Amino acid sequence: MSARNQIIQLAPGGVAPVLSYNVPEPTSYSGRNFIDLALPDNYFRDDIPYEPNVPTQEETLARLKAIQASVRSTLARDGMVAATATHSSLVLPGGERVSAELARLDPAEVQAMREAGRELVIYRGMSGTLMHRWAAPVKYAPAARDPRILVGGGGGSGGTGATANMIVYSPANGASFSGPHTGATVTVTGRASTSSLGATVGASVGIVGVGMEYVGTGNQVLEWSKTLTIRTSGQVTIRADAQDSLGSTRTVDVVVNVTLAAPPDGTAPVVSFDSPAAGSVVTGTPAGATVQAILSASDAVGVQSVRVARQGDATWKQATRDAGTGRWGCSLTLPLGASTLNAEAFDAAGNRGTAQVALTVQTPDTTAPTVAITSPSAGAQVVGPFEGVDVWVTGTAADDRGVRRVYLKVDGEPTEVDAVPRAAGDWSQWSGTVRMTRPDTRVITAYCVDAAGNTGDASVGIEVVLVPEMVSRLNRIILVESYRLSSYLGNYGAGRTLKTFSLLPGEKTKLSIKTFTKTEIDAKQASSILDSYSDESSVDFETATGKEQANKANYDESSKYSVEGEAKASWGWGSAGVKAGTSGGTNRAREEFVKNISNATQKHVSKASARRDVQINTSYEVKETSGEETAVEREIENVNVSRTLNFVFRQMNQEFITLLHLVDVRLGFFKVVDVEGQTEPRYVYREFTLPEVRTLLEDTIVPEWRDAVRDAVVHQLTHIFDYREECRSFAEWRDIPGEGQDSRYLRVRRDLVSTYLDGATGTEIDVPGIILAANKYVLRTEGILAEAVLGQGEALDEYSHGLQDQAVEAKRLANSAARQQLRRNRLAMQIVAAKDEEAAQLFAQLFPAFPPAAEEDASPAPVPPGQG
């Protein structure tokens, strides 16, 4: 490198160039999603040559003991006795990190969990730390053999020697008390004692069923008194307890009779419309319609009258009570259009209860409503467990007079499933769930009923594939997709208000700011995968991801998929029935995976953000606490003499742009070996890169199906829909020139980069692979925004303003006198410099009290005439 390139050259004029970088720094975690291609068993060879390589429970337990032995050795070397709860992970020789929970796991607990039907899995988490989880064992059986190409399933206590004693002086057992309806006051007195020398005795008293209240403690004897308020009538039990410091207790119960006055009637009657129903539509003539109003009314002391009127009418119509039903009724004539009926009910005390109902009167409606199904689309394939799958159906409905109901049926069966509107009365979008327990082509029909009873319908046919959930196939080929969850900084701005306070004129205070990172425990609880690399945040996210999985058994099983004895973080598991020339199954599995990751991220971020509390304390609010914490403390003062200074503190929020992008794909082969007669199944799991797909097919698939499986796999990887619903190709065929057809191999596209454009900031983010989800999340930060606002109100009266004006005038006059003195000093120095005796005599006559020249600068600069 030449000298010219080793330094930054100055631009003409001596201005240094400005180097500007706009390179976003992401926080990135990696995880894998497994998609079982659900191939029938007759596609696989019977003589697959691989040996079992997935650790058994005995081998996993041996590995656990070896890890713990290394942990003990490391702790002993470092002078530590044992791991403590404050350590989230331990670093072993060679840089290996082990979670504290795994290091403390008792082998006896592993055996107990095995007997309870749970297996230990040791895997490497998102943060690179060795962790563990418990997985349910899976039952295995061969899959169905299918001849068609690529169609698959998808009193006193203490005992002898008790020394405590209790005596209740008053009230006597059976005493009577009376009081207002709010409660009767009873004073209870008694004596608690203990016969043990040196022991102390305490007493508690209360009402059985309400609670006990502590009275006090004495040295061997305690005379006590307590006033209780009894708020129920009838027999009430008052209980007094004595307990000494040796643990001996004595309980005494006193039963008293309480009579409370009846409370005044201040409760309004309850009235409601039984008919017409709220929002109902009544068919009438152009002249209107007669509506029968039927109401229910109740009151503890009896309803005296009920009346009804149309809102806007001044005349009320009295309702009559039906002796048989006890309900009230009257008829009203209503015009066409919307009307609101008001009802009032009165009791004997004059209390009034009200009710209201809205309805519409219209001419007969004979037009059927319109309805459409927007999801699932026609011909869509739905894959689910063998016992059945829930299909989420969405659509639209409309009617000029209003939609009353939308319901769903499958294949015309009598079972009806009601759909749910987007909001009450808003059927412009609706949704519902139907249960599919039988595979094959199924027809979903949506029926829409309007307010007049007219019905419209729409249908869509889908293909249902049911795959056994708890019974896993003996042979499987799996798409192993590696993803990154990368988070980039987005907008940054002020969020919630933490505190506001004011300083009066001249007032001072100390201000302390304490953040959520003040202790190690708080910092760990507030950590998030969006802005930190920590075991706590990764474990919290993985836990949230696991809870989102619909197929728990297969998701747990994917934890065993290890390469060279090492299992990594699993983010999802799905199954896809594939056909040549289609990629709907795998894309639907990816959509489910993306939804689960997005939901888990949202829950994880919300949990972490809620724990990011920042405290703003003024000096008169600070409380002493034990322990140590980091705080920023400042002293502030309002220097204004007539205005209040107001402060507003807001916590700063950081927006994160989180991209879930597919970065690599491999093919996995899973096989259960020697199931019959084995106390524990043995497993084979191997992964192959895309260039090794030919080796995988030759080793595992019978010759007549290899081309079909290869073409199906290639189609799944060349038709992937990204977050913008654009079809992308992740893999490509590569030819080596001059080496013939056998040199052709499949690989991940090396030039594959996806760009995300943030519409809010205009920032472009390039990431490798295909973006399947782009979301924004907001996290609270340690940053604080402080705003100071000067109050507008004057704090001084006219007299105080006068004092301030005089003080300002005195300062002004003093400044003027100082300026005049400075001018005289300069004039004197000019006279001295010129040695003008006549001018000196005149100056002495004009300014007799002029200070000696020695106080001034001995050699002042000459002042031009006319200045000074």
Image (cartoon, rainbow, N blue to C red):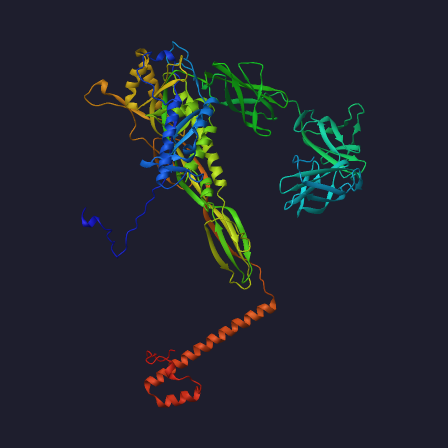
Residue 487 occupies quadrant: top left
Place of residue 189 in the rendered image (x, y in percent of width and height, measured from the top left): 74, 45
Q: Residue 676's quadrant in the figure?
A: top left
Whether 349 is drawn above or below 692: the answer is below
Q: Nearer the viewer, residue 296 or 202?
A: 202
Judged left or right of residue 772, residue 184 is right
- How many numbered circles does the render carry? 0
Q: Residue at x 74, y 27 (%)?
A: 294
Q: Nearer the viewer, residue 64 or 601?
A: 64
Residue toward you, 55 or 316: 55
The answer to whether residue 27 is visible is: no
- Residue positioned most to the top: 147
Residue 593 seen by the camera: yes
Quadrant location, the C terminus:
bottom left
Residue 135 drawn at (x, y percent): 44, 24
Query: Taking 723 as reference, is 258 left or right?
Result: right
Is 224 placed above or below 486 here?
A: below
Q: Residue at x 58, y 62 (%)?
A: 795
Compared to residue 725, the image places residue 88 above or below, namely below
